[in-house]
Amino acid sequence: MLASPSLGAPPRRGARPAAPAVVAPPVAAPEPPPAAPEPPVAAAPQPPAPAPAPAPTLPASVPADAAAAPAPGDETLGKLEAERLAEQRYGVRVSVTVDLARRSFSYSDPIGRQLAPYSLGAAPMATFELESYPAASSGIAVLRDLGLRGRVSRAFGLDSATPDGATLDTSWTRFGGELRQRVLFAGAHASELGFFVGADANYFDLHANAPVAALLPSARTVALRFGVDARVKVAGRLSATASAAYLATLDKGEIYARFRDASVAGVDGSLGLCVALGGGLEARAAARYTRYFSAFKPLVGDQNVAGGALDEALQMGLGVSYAH
């Protein structure tokens, strides 16, 4: 017969029963840990801002003040300009004067009443003169002292008449210009010597409102002018000036066309004093004398007969000038 299965051997008699087995309660499965939060979506990275440009630096051998120093060309020009002013080598001079002027015209060995002398007393005249040396600051020898000079004088309020008392409409204008080379001499009596060549014109017009017996000495004379001038410091603020020139006529003028084979030439000279006022200004007093002399070769039967003529002009005035 089949034995029933047993769980174990039967307990022995008098043996201590075994303690019941303790069955551990079932352990619940641990809860899964909470899901970690999703990381935030990072924004798209922005390109970094450009770094500021570094400040320019100078080599260790260059001083910091050199950053403000002028360019080499400007520094050279400034030095030349300073030398020009120190040597009193002005680049521009402007002069204005108020003058009194007179003119006289007379004949030598005249024949006939119509060759009467003429004289104009003191007439007011204004004069403007400009002198310029474009390369004065260049530092180039000779060229820096080569300049141009021009002047114009105009009389106003004129009144003249013939020996018979006939009134004459009168106008008088003088103008000219030249190329001038100057030479400067430094020292206690600083001086300036100039050589010039140019042209000079003297327009003296006379018109009668009625017939007159005298021959009117109208003349528009134009001449080449060659000469020399000088300026010397006398003492303190006082300087003296002088000039002399020869006038070789290009156009003799109307009066000389009335005589046979007229030859005309002239001379010109001036004297003056200047007082420095400061800042390039100076007061001036000057006188200029111009003399045209002529010779004629008349023949028997000529309408106008004379050995020659003398035309003189004197101009004196006071004024101011500015030089820089």
Image: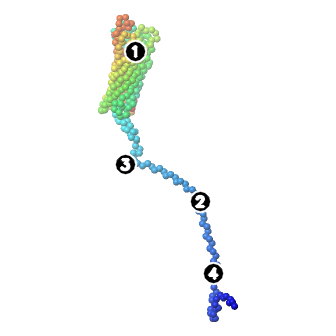
- The residues bearing labels 2 and 4 have C-alpha atoms spaced at a distance of 48 Å
Q: Is residue 20 left or right of residue 267?
A: right
Question: Which residue is drawn at the image coordinates 34% and 27% (left, top)?
Answer: 181
The numbered dot on residue 253 is: 1
Disc nearest the viewer among 4 and 3: 4
| Residue farthest right in this picture | 1
Q: Is residue 299 left or right of residue 212?
A: left
- The residues bearing labels 3 and 2 have C-alpha atoms spaced at a distance of 55 Å
- The residues bearing labels 4 and 3 have C-alpha atoms spaced at a distance of 93 Å
| Three-letter amino acid code at the position of disc 2 | Val
Which one is earlier in the sequence, the residue at label 3 or at label 2?
2
| Residue farthest left in this picture | 188
The numbered dot on residue 41 is: 2
Which structural element holds mark 3? Answer: loop
**Which residue is label 3 attached to?**
61
Is 132 above or below relative to 224?
below
Is label 4 in contact with label 3 (beta carbons under 8 Å)? Answer: no
Question: Which residue is drawn at the image coordinates 39% and 40% (left, top)?
Answer: 72
